[in-house]
Each structure stands twice: as C-alpha cells, then as structure tokens.
Image: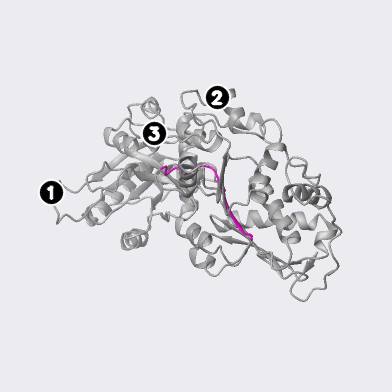
C-alpha cells in the first residue's frame, strides 16, 4: 500500500466496467471484484453481501433520499458494510467523491477506519491507486478522500461530501448530526446515513427521532427508514427465538447464537439486552443497577471482624450531597459493610461536610482492620488524601474517568448477579444500591442517580461499592504486602 502524500500511485483507471447503471448492482460487482472481509467470520474471503444487506445498500445508493435511517442490533456487521459502501463511493463516484464517517469516540473511529484501510490493503488494485494517511485515504486521480472522525460538531463544520455516515446514531451528538445534515446542498448527489442501535435515553436520540418522523411522514421521499427489530413483541421473554430471528438477520450466519445465549439476563440487564440485541425500546424506568431481589439475596447479616485485611472506600462531597465510607474484605468474593455516612440535615442550607470527622473515621478504621488501601476520587478531597498519605496511610486515588468506571461497574454487576460478593445487610447500603441506576452514553456505562434533584435518594455508598469491589478483587490476585498499621 502506498503511504504518505508524495508516494507514487497508479493513476490509471480502476479495472472496473460493470454493465449495469443501477448503483446497488454496480456496488455488488465492485464488492465481488475488490472487497475482502477484513476480519472475523470468512476473514479475507469475498464480502458476499446478504440479501438483507443489499436492501440497506439500495436504500443508500438507489433511493435518491438525502437521509437514510437504519436501526439494527449489535453484531450485525454494520462497520464492515459501512466501510464497503464508503469505499465504493470513494473509488467510483468520480471527482471529489469525499466520504466522511463519524463515530461516537476515537476508539470507534479507529475501528471504522481500520476496516476500510484493511479492505484496501487486501486488494492490490485499490491499494496501488490510494494514498493512506493516519486518519484518511486519498485518491489523487479524482481528488477524493475517505476520512473518519470522532464525533465533534466543530470538526464537521465546512464539510463537502457525497456520503456521510453517522455511526451509533442512538447515542451520537445531536449538534454534530445537525451540522452534518446542514452541509448538504453543495452536491447534486449526496446522502447522510444514520445507523445504529437504540440508545438508553429514549426521550432524546437522533435515531429514534428519524424513526418517528418516518412513521408520521411516509410520503416524504427525502428520507428512507429501515429497521431490523422485534418491536411490538416486548411482552415476549428475552430468550424468545422468534424475536431473535426478527431482529437479527445475521443470526446463525456471522452472528453466532451461543453469543446471544451467553448474554441473556441476568448476565446483563434485561433492558440493555432488549435494546442492544432486539432493538426493542425498553423503558429507562427499569434501568435499575441490579435486578430485583439480587442485593437482598447476598446478605449474610454479619459485619467484618476486626483485624481482617480490607480496603476502605471514600465517596466524599462538599455540602449538598452525602459523604460515605465503606469497607470491603480483600478477596475474590469480597464482603462489604458500612463504616459511616454523613448527610446534610433536611432544610440546613449552611451544612458543610465535617472533613476532620471523616479523616478521624478513616484513621479509626485503620486501627480496627488491616487496611491495604484507602480509595477515593481525589476531586475536592485532595487535601484529605495528602494528609492521610503523610501519616503513612495507604492512600490510592481512583479518578472517576469514564473508562475506569465502565469497567468497574460492569465487574461489580457481574459479581453481584453471579453471587460472587456478600454484604452485612446494612439498610442504608441497601437503599443506596436500590436508588442507583445505570447511565449509558458514548463513553460507556456508569452508576448515577435517577434524578438530579437535591431530594433524590442518595447513591454514595453504591459509588463506594464500585471502587471497593474493583480494588479488593484486584488486591486478591496480587502478592500480598503487609498492610500498614496505624497506632493512636
């Protein structure tokens, strides 16, 4: 493959002369001659688009619509299909055939670009005519580009494209999508494709707005809508084979049935499974962190004896929220208990968290147990962590970055539903866990309150639970160092 702006490329016409004038049929011939599957099932083999995939291709290439909305479940090969359609347009639509793909984040953008780049690499005819840069392909013979971006409204300003693909339209930034749409009109032929799986916020997402518009305005030919879903069968159980077949056209082809069985609730939450695998619009009201009854079933009714090796987690606030301390045994199956909780008294707008009392409670915990870590997000509590560390307490910072919280939350959920944790049965801890819901967006999933109201139920002990489980189980897999003691 030719790389860099000065690399020599073959500027002769692509050896491609299909007889049909229908774009979807020309695409099929292009895929047969040049496109190979970049990875996974049938890797390096011909793409061989399935009939249901060709329906999508016809929507994009033949319909004449300016906007195409596509809803389909996870595992349907949309990244590969997007890349193939994009490359066809890039190589075959003449001068200035610019293709842009917007992904929800940098990681997804890299995956999308890697698929297109790998397809070019696997075809000598394409590779010899194309220059490859870090985030785009360039065709000198037609001054065309194929570029992939992480979603940013500012980055979409001033676009001039013939094909724009907005991936993960269930969670994509609305401002970005509108900027991309408004860039149309510079070309006689251009199309925006919004493709994805329903996101968790059913009241505010681009994908479902396109769906609703298509249902209300079937006469508008400027937009085409297609979905693969089991919508209307929400009363069926999540393991309903009829629903699986309706929603997953790739089932038993390149989507393997055992993968769906492996993800059935309670291994993942039912609302998440229905959205991601069946494209059913599961209500956000059932977005509780744990299924009903799971937490109560993990109670032993006993605390943690003095002298045990433990971690202590702090979720601290300044004034309005709750501050909580939780303890967990260091074990692959940790046991949890509450140390203390500080809450703002109702009606006391002058309340401030007694920071000195929190620090003294941590010192007391270090005298009671063998504390191997004191864990906290340093936000607003940096001074406390510095003071405790100066006293030789084993302070560990746990910044609440999206990637860290997504992994830790998923691990805690899996451990809870599979019975790999226990707890003392503390009523306040149970209330905080019951009040916690899952928020999902482009950055991943994390615990959150059901409401941002000041009177909403608190979840601070649940936040401690996420941190403590992550560190207690990690500590259990490592060579044990002697815990630091703290003498009065």
User: CB under 8 Å between callouts 3 and 1?
Assistant: no
Which one is earlier in the sequence, the residue at label 3 or at label 1? 3
Which one is earlier in the sequence, the residue at label 1 or at label 2? 2
Q: Position of residue 419 (x, y in %)?
A: 47, 28
Nearer the camera: disc 3 or disc 1:
3
Identify residue for label 1. Answer: 347
Observer-nearest of 263 and 478: 263
Calculate the distance from the C-alpha at mark 3 to the C-alpha at mark 2. 18 Å
Q: Does the rendering let one see residue 333? A: no
SS at mark 2 in the image: loop
Q: Could you say which quadrant of the image residue 73 lies in?
A: top right
Taking the spot 63% from the left edge, 32% from the top edge, the residue there is 259
Identify residue for label 2. Answer: 239
Observer-nearest of 399 and 30: 30
Q: Could you say which quadrant of the image residue 416 lies in?
A: top left
Calculate the distance from the C-alpha at mark 3 to the C-alpha at mark 1. 31 Å
Taking the spot 66% from the left edge, 57% from the top edge, the residue there is 113
User: CB under 8 Å between callouts 3 and 2?
Assistant: no
Which stretch did the figure color magenta? Answer: 189-202
Q: Does the rendering let one see residue 67? A: yes
Identify residue for label 3. Answer: 286
């Amino acid at each position: 493959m030719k790389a860099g702006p000065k690399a020599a490329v073959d500027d002769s016409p692509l050896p491609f002369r299909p007889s049909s004038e229908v774009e979807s049929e020309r695409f099929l011939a292009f895929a047969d001659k040049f496109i190979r599957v970049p990875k996974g099932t049938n890797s390096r083999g011909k793409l061989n688009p399935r009939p249901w995939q060709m329906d999508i291709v016809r929507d994009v290439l033949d319909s004449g619509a300016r906007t195409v909305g596509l809803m389909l479940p996870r595992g349907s090969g949309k990244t590969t299909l997007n890349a193939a359609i994009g490359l066809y347009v890039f190589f075959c639509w003449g001068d200035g055939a610019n293709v842009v793909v917007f992904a929800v984040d940098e990681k997804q953008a890299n995956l999308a670009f890697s698929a297109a780049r790998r397809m070019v690499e696997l075809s000598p005819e394409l590779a010899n005519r194309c220059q490859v840069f870090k985030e785009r392909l360039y065709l000198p013979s037609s001054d065309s580009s194929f570029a992939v971006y992480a979603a940013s409204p500012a980055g979409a300003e001033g676009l001039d494209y013939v094909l724009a693909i907005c991936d993960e339209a269930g969670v994509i930034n609305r401002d970005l999508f509108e900027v991309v749409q408004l860039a149309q009109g510079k070309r006689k032929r251009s199309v925006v494709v919004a493709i994805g799986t329903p996101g968790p916020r059913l009241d505010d997402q681009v994908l479902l707005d396109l769906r609703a518009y298509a249902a209300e305005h079937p006469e508008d030919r400027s937009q085409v809508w297609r979905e693969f879903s089991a919508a209307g069968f929400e009363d069926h159980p999540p393991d309903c084979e009829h629903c699986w077949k309706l929603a997953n056209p790739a089932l038993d082809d390149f989507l393997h049935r055992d993968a769906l069985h492996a993800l059935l609730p309670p291994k993942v939450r039912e609302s998440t499974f229905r959205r991601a695998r069946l494209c059913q619009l599961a209500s956000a009201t059932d977005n509780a962190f744990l299924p009903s009854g799971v937490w109560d079933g993990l109670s032993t009714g006993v605390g943690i004896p003095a002298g045990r090796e433990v971690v202590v987690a702090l979720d601290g606030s300044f004034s309005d929220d709750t501050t909580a301390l939780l303890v967990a045994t260091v074990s692959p199956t940790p046991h949890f208990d509450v140390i203390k909780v500080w809450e703002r008294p109702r009606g006391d707008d002058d309340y401030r968290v007694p920071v000195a009392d929190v620090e003294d409670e941590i010192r007391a915990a270090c005298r009671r147990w063998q504390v191997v870590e004191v864990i906290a997000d340093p936000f607003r509590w940096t001074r406390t962590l510095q003071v405790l560390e100066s006293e030789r307490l084993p302070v560990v910072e746990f910044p609440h970055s999206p990637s860290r919280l997504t992994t830790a939350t998923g691990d805690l959920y899996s451990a809870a539903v599979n019975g790999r944790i226990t707890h003392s049965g503390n009523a306040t801890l149970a209330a905080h866990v019951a009040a916690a819901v899952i928020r999902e967006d482009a950055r991943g999933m994390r615990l959150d309150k059901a409401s941002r109201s000041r009177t909403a139920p608190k979840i601070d002990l649940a936040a401690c639970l996420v941190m403590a489980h992550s560190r207690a189980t990690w500590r259990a897999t490592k060579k044990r160092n002697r815990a630091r003691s703290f003498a009065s």
